[in-house]
Amino acid sequence: MSLGYPIDLHTHSLRSDGALSPTELVRRAASRGVRIQALSDHDTLAGIAEAVAVGDELGVRIIPATELNTESEWGDAHVLGYFVDPADGALAERLSGLRENRGRRIELMVERLNRLGYAIALARVLEIAQGGALGRPHLAEALREKGYVRTYDEAFATLIAKDSPAYVARVGLTPLEAVALIRDHGGVPALAHPGTVIGLEDLLPKLVAAGLAGIECYYAEHSPATTARCLALARTHSLVPTGGSDFHGRGEHGAPLGGTFVPPESIPALEARRGRNAAATMAPAVGGGS
Ligand code: AMP
Ligand code: FE
Ligand code: FE
Ligand code: ZN
């Protein structure tokens, strides 16, 4: 008997803000019965080759992916890009620019923490990240190991979440730009954890027009009502309902690997949405409304 579901379309390694190397991550997923796994590190494809190599050994199919966080009035709108090409140099260049923005933002947050009396060294944050795309989880670890907070989650709750004292907004893509970026590079964009979006019903048609193909209906932090709402939106907008754990291996955030149901038919459905110019043609305007 396996411990979870056989598909996981949302996982992070220490190439971004996860705690495990791609090798450890795929091994752990395999041991839990996962057979299809998307490695979706933030703003990087650096872990894909290693994950694919381990996946080949263990019988886990790795779907190359990335997760683009955005900054806009739409709240936390994160775009997963599936079937992106790790050999796409132009995409790598764009992601590298996004990682530079991440680095500058974390520097600003370290300065802010220092001014607030939390003696966190940027050098230590970089060590914790081990070369991965920098993010607030690395700050949370630095705060925890210095004893300023008891847990990783407490760091977010008290200091570094939006509206907390040390928070600095990101300079980055809008949700529409993120969808377009994935589409322009032949990937298949899906909206991650839609429950964190502000104004989902208004944003979604715009994203669909830009080429959005999927929506992460199944997510550990969704209430049954949120899941139902997302499934209804998927039907309305002809989007593929997807799901994933968002496993990072840090704190309480996300689910265990393979811990979230993912419809098996979502894999061929996402594959069928590959292609650069699929936007606009796939979802006919609904009703006659807006
Ligand atoms: P950043 O990319 O620097 O904005 O950090 C966002 C990341 O922090 C997310 O991808 C999660 O890994 C993590 N995260 C965000 N909010 C929380 C939270 N409330 N508790 C724990 N981890 C969080
Ligand atoms: Fe993350
Ligand atoms: Fe996310
Ligand atoms: Zn994620």
Image (cartoon, rainbow, N blue to C red):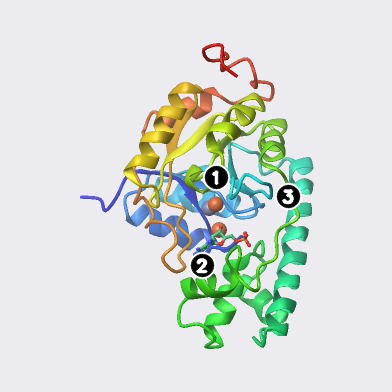
Alpha-carbon neighbours of circle 1 within 10 Å: few (<14), some, or many (≥20)?
some
Secondary structure state at the residue bearing disc 2: loop
Secondary structure state at the residue bearing disc 1: loop
Q: Earlier in the sequence, mark 1 or mark 3?
A: 3
Task: Write the residue at 44% across / 36% down.
Answer: 242
Mark sitting on residue 95: 3
Q: Which residue is mark 1?
A: 197
Q: CA distance from mark 1 to mark 3?
A: 22 Å
Which kind of residue does numbered mark 3 sit on?
Answer: Leu
Q: Earlier in the sequence, mark 1 or mark 2?
A: 2
Task: Tell us which disc is closer to us: 1 or 2.
Answer: 1
Residue at the extreme top of the image, as rendered: 288
Does residue 180 appear left or right of residue 21 in this picture? right
Which kind of residue does numbered mark 2 sit on?
Answer: Ala
Q: Which residue is mark 2?
A: 19
Secondary structure state at the residue bearing disc 3: helix
